Amino acid sequence: MPPATRPTRSGPIGVVGPVLAVLLIAAGLVLLRDALVGYRAVPGPAWIPLGLGAVDGLAPGTGFLVGGIIAVLVGVWLLYAALRRRVRSRAVLRARTGVYLAPGDIARLASAAAEDVGGVVTASSKAGTRSVRTTVRTTGGPGIDQAVLDAVHQRLDVLDPAPRVTVVVRGPTGRSRS
């Protein structure tokens, strides 16, 4: 049986969709208002003929050129956003089972590995699918930063590719980074 496909989250089109929906609702409200004006249910002039009358007779100029270029660029960007690859939201395990880890799970694994190192009092981690930052509080001791780095690397070696690991050590002698 083939492994499951890698999970993804929505890309920029997730932002564009609601914006286009609001614009479509606004256009629908203008059409509805003009229809009610036509049936004399709402007093006042219709907005669509006023808008068309305002642009009727305008001569082509640089404003139209700039507006056209902007419209084309926005359209090309919308097509690109709709068709481009989605963001990978999970890290792959080296097994062929189709098992994936979320960034929060990777952070928990890194923190647990760091806490197993002697001299580490507490550990916290922040992770993405490609990098992990582990911050540890220690009682001190030489080489503890390298021991934590090795432990986190060994624990996260099951990921393909293994993420880049950064360790920040806070202890009695101050702060160091590796």
Image (spheres, rainbow, N blue to C red):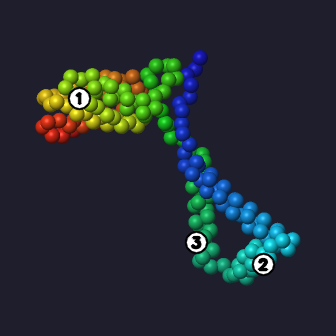
Residue 58, image x, y percentages: 69, 81
Q: Identify the mark nearer the N-term, 3 or 2.
A: 2
The part of the image, by quadrant, that contains residue 171 is top left
Q: From the image, tell me which residue sits under label 3.
A: 66
Q: CB of mark 1 within 8 Å of CB of mark 3?
A: no
Q: Three-letter amino acid code at disc 2?
A: Gly
Specify the quadrant of the image occupied by residue 173. top left
**Distance from Cα at disc 3 to Cα at disc 2:** 33 Å
Residue mark closest to the camera, 3 vs 2: 2
Q: Is residue 168 left or right of residue 43?
A: left
At 13% across and 29% down in the image, what residue appears? 142
The tag earlier along the polypeptide, 1 or 3, is 3
Q: Secondary structure at mark 1?
A: strand
Judged from this view, the residue extending furthest toward the top is 1
Whether residue 70 is visible, yes or no, is yes
Residue 21: x %, y % from top left: 66, 55
Task: Depth check: give the residue in front, 71 or 15.
Answer: 15
Picture disc at residue 121: 1
Distance in Å between CA atoms under marks 2 and 1: 73 Å
Quick check: 150 left or right of 53?
A: left
Q: CA distance from mark 1 to mark 3?
A: 61 Å
Compared across the picture, whether 14 is left or right of 146 comes to right
Residue type, mark 3 in image? Val
The residue tagged 2 is 44
Tell me if 168 is positioned left or right of 36 in this view.
Answer: left
Instruction: Tell me if mark 3 has few (under 14), some (14-19) or many (20+) residues whose alpha carbon lies within 10 angstroms of its own.
Output: few
Residue 83 image label: none
Residue located farthest toward the right when viewing the structure as drawn? 39
Quadrant where the C terminus is found in the figure: top left
Where is 121 relative to 176, above or below? Answer: above
Residues packed near mark 1 inside 10 Å, few (<14), some (14 to 19) or many (20 plus)? some
